[in-house]
Amino acid sequence: MLWRGLGEDARLLWRGLVLFRGVAAEASRLGGHLAAPAAPGTPRQPGTGAARAPATPRGPARRLARTGPGAPVLVVATLMVLIMTMLGVEQVTGMSLLPDRLTAGLRPPPRAFPVLPASPPVELDIQAVDVHAPVHRVGLAADGTIGVPDEKRSHEAAWYDQGPTPGQYGPAVIVGHVDSSTGPAVFHDLKRLRAGDRIEVDRADRSVAIFEVNAVERFDKERLPVDEVFGDFSRPNLRLITCGGRWVGGPTGYADNVVVFASLVKARRP
């Protein structure tokens, strides 16, 4: 795992440097057309409103002025360093910190994946957080949200049966309690998952869908990004959802949702 992580970081760094070289070259080309603001007290030419150019530097100062990288290049370099640092943090924490449009071409492309026929899940295994739980069905609750398991079944997970089954195209959704009146529940340690952890879902047809965690995120329940969580039909995905954050009581319970984003990477067939 360590060597694979280092290899991915090296590839990301190389892509970042290539991108930086291209952007820096463009910035250097444009830099000559950018006018710096005039310093206070700079004399102006009558009628033009433009600041008079300072005297051309001579000797060593002139050579430095010609060979310096220029402000645009330094700004781009600083931004690229920050982006690569944040990508490294994403690799370690599993949290998505940068918008996709800012990192297009830097993240590793998704791997090849199988696609499975419809078959409901019957068991969930997540070795990294010691989860081995049966899975039953839930539908829509009376208020139009995804239903949750009864408290008496807090040690079970529940698959939302109005969406894809695990292994089909789209996001299969499995929900579970973080705790109950008797203590920790099935998804109590979900927040500890990290990018690269494996999730195995046993299905009714005796096949096993194996997912790899992409990210773990926490969202305010009132501002859940529906498209991001439920809208990706580009490949077979899995969403594990539980509660988290601050306890506010009432019908809300915890203020946030913890969402695990995972992608299908392998399947075992009977």
Image (cartoon, rainbow, N blue to C red):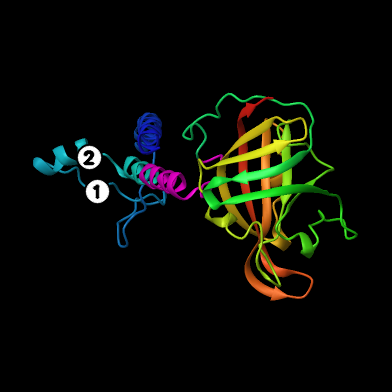
Q: Residue at x 61, y 37 (%)?
A: 211
Rendering coords of residue 193 (x, y %): 53, 50
Viewed as shown, does residue 154 lie left or right of 245? right
Few, some or many C-alpha atoms within 10 Å of disc 2 (few <14, some 14-19, many ≥20)? few
The quadrant holding residue 263 is: top right
- Observer-side mark, 1 or 2, equals 2
Residue 85 belongs to magenta span: yes
Q: Is residue 73 found left or right of 241 in the rendered image?
A: left
Residue pointed to by mark 1? 54
User: Helix, strand, or loop for circle 1?
Assistant: loop
The amino acid type found where label 1 is placed reads Pro
Quarter of the image containing the C terminus?
Answer: top right
Mark sitting earlier along the chain (1/2): 1
Q: Is residue 193 visible?
A: no
Residue located 81% across and 61% down the image: 150
Amino acid tagged 2: Gly
Disc marking residue 95: none
